[in-house]
Image (cartoon, grey):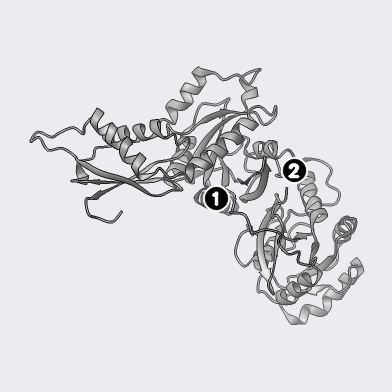
Amino acid sequence: MSARAGLPVVAIVGRPNVGKSALFNRLVGRRVAIVEDVPGVTRDRLYAETAWRERRFAVVDTGGLISDATEGLAARVRAQATQAAAEADVVLLVVDAHDGLVPEDQAVADVVRRTGAPVLVVANKVDDPAREPAVAEFYALGFGDPLPVSALHGRGVGDLLDAVVALLPPVVPAAAPEAPAPPAVAIVGRPNVGKSSLVNAILGEERVVVDTAPGTTRDAVDTVLERDGQRLVLIDTAGLRRPSRVHEAVEAYGVARTRRAVGRAQVAVLVLDAAEPVADQDQHIARQIAEAGCGLVVALNKWDLVAATPRRDPRRERAVRHALRFVPYAPLVVTSAVRGWGIATLLEMVERVATAYRARIPTGVLNRIVGDAVRRTPPPADAAGRRLRIYYATQPESAPPRIVLFVNEPQRMSEAYQRYLERAIRQAHPLPGVPLRFVLRRRGEAP
């Protein structure tokens, strides 16, 4: 499994607050990583693709590498950064030209040296050419010429990219045409419901930093998963709080990025805490997913806290269904990231929803379904005997499926009758986890 299969990887490492995320954003040409003038903002490995002189490669941003961290969150962030460096084709060791060479830079260099990868020392925050001679002290790290750059202003970044491309491994000709992009699956939910733990259980490794304190994940992190020949892009996201409870700028960035992740995903897994009743915020997130037109699977996580076995509890499930009754099409899966319960079932359901999300019902089949439903239960008539007439149905779009009904008078379609038609379509052509959108047109209008 690779975060960006087939592309060489350039890892950005260094001690905290030397400007790694600012450099990451500069290299990929857009603001992907959260940047704040406080140490420790980046925790997980964050990947993005970029290109320079016709060479495409992946860049990975990492958390601040504290060499002597042995426990807690700092140790896990250190492990993430070390693993990123070990997997990289080129390592960018970022140092702070304002601070000069400090002992922690040397300690980080010792960690990076053990990876055996080519290393470029990037002396960041050289905003003024007059400061360039001062970077000579970084020769002491033993990796050759330090490269002065200003990630903030873009100074020296072109020279840095030239040096990176010169160290990348040779291009290997593609053996086959590139496969279609795999479906993106966003893992979303309130803070501390076990989203990152669930991602790690799915991946079978600690690919994402997990901590018991709520709010550990700030960036939306993409990871490609290959399973039985199928590929999925898992997006671990920050916990979504109510806007009134979002105070820090960093958390606001994370919430915004989570919403964008849902917007670009085909399927969202809404993670709930089985030990707690469905909260208002859980309902709010489910509505956001539905409004975004995203497929939905509900994971009732932490099941080990409420039951000794993975057996389903109909009473508890009915309570969840009732709270989420506005998305009745969403399948519910019981999971425990700690025990590994329900992980295979969850993946199977995600793949089913991803397939249904792209489904297209043939026009002839759709018209038979709608016609049979109308004959069984015609639309109600008003006091004057006028009623809705449905002439024709078609599905011009999938992802998500959009049903266009050509009728005599669109305003006569009631919500109740539209729900009836939706149930009839779903019974005849199952679309698990997929929102079904209806558009009403007068006969003769374009779909």
Q: Mark 2 falls on what kind of element?
A: helix
Q: Mark 1 falls on what kind of element?
A: helix
Q: Position of residue 249 (x, y in %)?
A: 57, 54
What is the number of the mark on residue 240? none
Q: Position of residue 197 (x, y in %)?
A: 67, 37
Q: Are marks 2 and 1 in contact (CB under 8 Å)?
A: no
Q: Earlier in the sequence, mark 2 or mark 1?
A: 2
Q: Which residue is mark 2?
A: 73
Q: Position of residue 307 (x, y in %)?
A: 62, 18
Identify residue type, mark 2: Leu
Residue projecting furthest to the left: 384
Depth check, front residue: 85 or 280: 85
Looking at the image, residue 393 lies above or below residue 87? above
In the displayed structure, does residue 360 sit left or right of residue 228?
left
Q: Position of residue 157 (x, y in %)?
A: 71, 74
Q: What is the distance, in whole Å, between disc 2 and disc 1 at their CAs? A: 25 Å
Determine crowd level at label 1: few under 14, some 14-19, many 20+ residues with C-alpha closer than 10 A: many
In the displayed structure, does residue 430 sit left or right of residue 273?
left
Residue in view at x 90 percent, y 66 percent: 141
Q: Which residue is mark 1?
A: 261
Depth check, front residue: 300 or 224: 224
Quadrant of the image occupied by residue 445: bottom left
